[in-house]
Image (cartoon, rainbow, N blue to C red):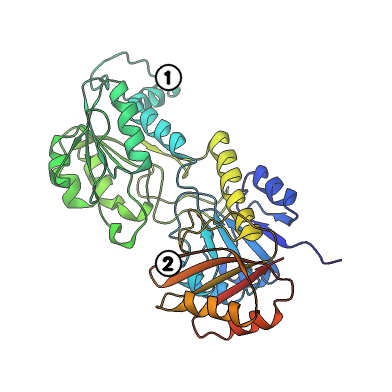
Amino acid sequence: MPSPARALLLENIHSDAAWTLKDAGFDVERLDRALSENELVERLPGVALLGIRSNTTVSARVLDAAPDLLALGAFCIGTNQIDLTATAQHGVAVFNAPFSNTRSVVELALSEIIALTRRLTVKNTDMHAGRWDKSAVGSHEVRGRRLGIVGYGNIGSQLSVLAESLGMSVLFFDTADKLTLGNARRCGTLDELLAESDVVTLHVDGRVSNSSLFGEEQFARMRPGSIFLNLSRGFVVDHVALRRHIESGHLTGAAVDVFPVEPKVSGEEFVSTLRGLPNVILTPHVGGSTEEAQQDIGHFVAGKLRDYAALGTTSLSVNLPAVALPRAAGPRLLHLHVNTPGVLATVTSLLAEHGINIEGQLLATAGPLGYVITDVAAVDLSALTGALLAMPETVRLRVLP
């Protein structure tokens, strides 16, 4: 009897993910830490499914050493820790959780906006030091203040709605066309948003072009006395410039949840130029770290990995064409190929040549790749699979019984 396929889950991914994969027949191993590149190279042979969070980097070298890997799950929003080009070239599907922790991040942002606007961090520090100061100087309600959201995606747009319910006026800037929700107002430029906002919060994605998005020039354009938040990516902000503007009093507060370099494990020293500043909230990349979000992420991403392994379904994959075909009786062929004209015609011609009838078929293409799922009415596919593998366009072929 064949051994069950193996799944490796890193960085303390929620136990519900493990149970989802175990119920699907996988032998699951869980670790509470990230693995280095060398450790991944050693551990991945024989692993069909890999689950990571933000502290594990999956490089081309890692993928070269993982011939059995079918799919990779990022149990978080970002995928910049994964070489997506290399995963596609190896035929490894990548899934993430673009929606599951949205509410948790939004609630953290709102709580920090209120805490900083009321200067609760300063009051808390004073109280622990035995100082009783009831002064209202510098403390404000958030009602009526202007919130500037940079990046109006899933998180930014939900934050917009909830901030309005607190009485804030919302402005946003995004390079892409986005549906405006509620009474939010779109700004034509980032500079326009900075000049008008009392609070500026970043919710941009991890694309390379966002590196160093926010530095000395942008901080200088913010309103005197305003507040800054970054709960998106660590590499988008110049922390040295942020410290200067906090120390000078130009900005009255900041909250940062993500950093250019972060400790790999709990207990490792956190090093940052932002340490020790008053009215600055530093959190250890916990925007999505609520029990509710982590459980939902565990269910969602593990379900995507399970469905890809069992059915070849690529809905919401970040690197492969999206295909979902209801399963017919009989074997299923999963053919990932270079996106060139005529591939589907060649596949169907080979099926005809081998006397195999098509029960269902669906093709999708995205960029350099095409992906076709074909359900067939046959049992012996050995000759056909050899012919499909011999096609120069073939990237990866799987046959599901």
| Position above or below: 148 against 68 | above
Mark 1 lies on a secondary structure that is loop
Secondary structure state at the residue bearing disc 2: strand
Q: Is residue 334 left or right of residue 128?
A: right
Percent position (x, y) of residue 360? 58, 62
- Give the label on residue 130, or none: 1
Q: Is residue 298 above or below residue 360?
A: above
Camera-near label (2 vs 1) is 2
- Residue 329 is left or right of residue 53, and the answer is right
Q: Residue furthest right?
A: 1
Q: For mark 2, what is the residue?
A: 365
Q: Can you say whether 267 is above or below 70 in the image? A: above
Q: Residue at x 73, y 63 (%)?
A: 5
Neighbourhood count class around disc 2 (C-alpha, 10 Å): few under 14, some 14–19, many 20 upward: some
Q: Amino acid at mark 1?
A: Gly
Disc 1 residue crowd, few under 14, some 14–19, many 20+, Cα 10 Å: few
For the question of whether residue 183 can be seen, the reply is yes
